Amino acid sequence: MKLAVLCPHFAPDAAPTGEVISRIVLELADRGHELHVVTALPWYVNHKVDAPWAGKMVRREKTQWGSITRVNPFPTDKTSIPQRAAAFAAFSALAGLTGLRGGKVDGVLAMSPPLTLGLTGWGMHLARRGPLVFNIQDVFPDVAVELGAITNQSVISLAKWLERFSYERADAVTVLSEDLRDNLTAKIGPAHRHKIRVIPNFVDTVAITPRDRMTTYRRELGIGDETVVLYAGNVGLSQSLELVAHAARELRHDPSVVFVINGGGSGLEPIKAQTADLPNVRFAPYQPRERLAEVLASGDIHLVPLKKGLARSSVPSKTYSVLAAGRPLLASVDAGTEVARVVEQAACGLAVPPEDSGAFLAGLTSLLADTEGRAAMGQRGRAFVEQWASPAAVAEAYERLFDELRHRDGV
């Protein structure tokens, strides 16, 4: 098959969604397919176009499996919703214009967020005459509304209209969990439920394996044999990192425990300010992708703290990476959601209510006291993810879906 792929990030950009789509593309290429990617110039880590890529609005490159077209993402202040919306719209329009070339394809795969790529994907579907699969990583505008980042009712109404329009125009919509399937079904009605498919994000169980906890990364942070409580990922509005700050403050007199926050985002400076006087908190920037397994191995307990309601609209991809690393998980998420179900089903950690500092501290204290139990949780998590979410399995699911849509349409 010849496929067009439309996404906001692609390797070497370090965004989690970029890592997901990059590996899916490579797996599909290994299965003999031709792929043409339209994406942004790398910009995620520093929130500006990386120096080696700056200077041009559009860059194109040939690959062994097809091509990559990278366009300017128009980076703006992450805290300004109007500016970000304008940047997403400009990026989506430029990506759409550059993605029209290349002739007919057998399918179009578009990724959201940003939601505007649903409209761009529909345009590519019409121009290049291949069925459209719209992949949803986070449900927008639900996340922004839950966070209070968008309060203008006119803007919310417009975003919800674009959301429904995109879902209804797509030939299939892929989501990461049954929670998200139910979310979308409620919006577009049961008549469209058949087009909503659950395909999880993969975890690279070959690159990410259980390793010795005494890593070079620890030494770089001045950490020895202490128990490391690690949050690694985006430090933004969706995460309840104030729970981490509260726990660190309560445990500040215990020299055997160190908290590490690895990542960046709009919430980084506030959490640094909250913990500035705490000797048991370390901060580290995003690490190169090739160090991911080492970073994960450095943590003895990993954290997934989401604010109320967000676990129904988002499934953090790092959840499965933590399990692949053989480490236990403390998840602060809504009961009954995907992450909570995985933790319960795999018996790989603890799930506590979101934004509840008392429950979070109690769960963390329990894990800190149970060294042998943590090791067993890590082993069970590793076994669970090996059976469920390999890159090859995810790529095969997309291959089957495009085959189904092509044959349905008589392509």
Image: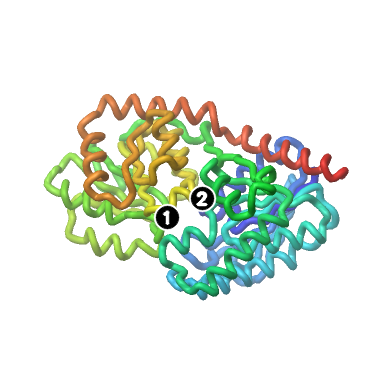
**Element at badge 2?**
helix
Residue 355's x, y, as percent? 31, 52
Q: Nearer the viewer, residue 33 or 383?
A: 383
Q: Are marks 1 and 2 in contact (CB under 8 Å)?
A: yes
Q: Nearer the viewer, residue 168 or 358?
A: 168
Residue type (three-letter) at the residue carrying disc 2 = Pro
Image quarter hosting the C terminus: top right
Identify the residue position indicated by label 1 in the image. Answer: 234
237 displayed left or right of 3: left
Residue 148's x, y, as percent? 41, 66
116 displayed left or right of 231: right
Q: Residue at x 51, y 54 (%)?
A: 15
Q: Residue at x 65, y 66 (%)?
A: 92
Residue type (three-letter) at the residue carrying disc 1 = Asn
* Label 1: few (<14), some (14–19) or many (≥20) C-alpha neighbours in 10 Å: many
Residue 73: which numbered mark, if any?
none
Residue 329's x, y, as percent? 36, 38
Identify the residue position indicated by label 2 in the image. Answer: 16
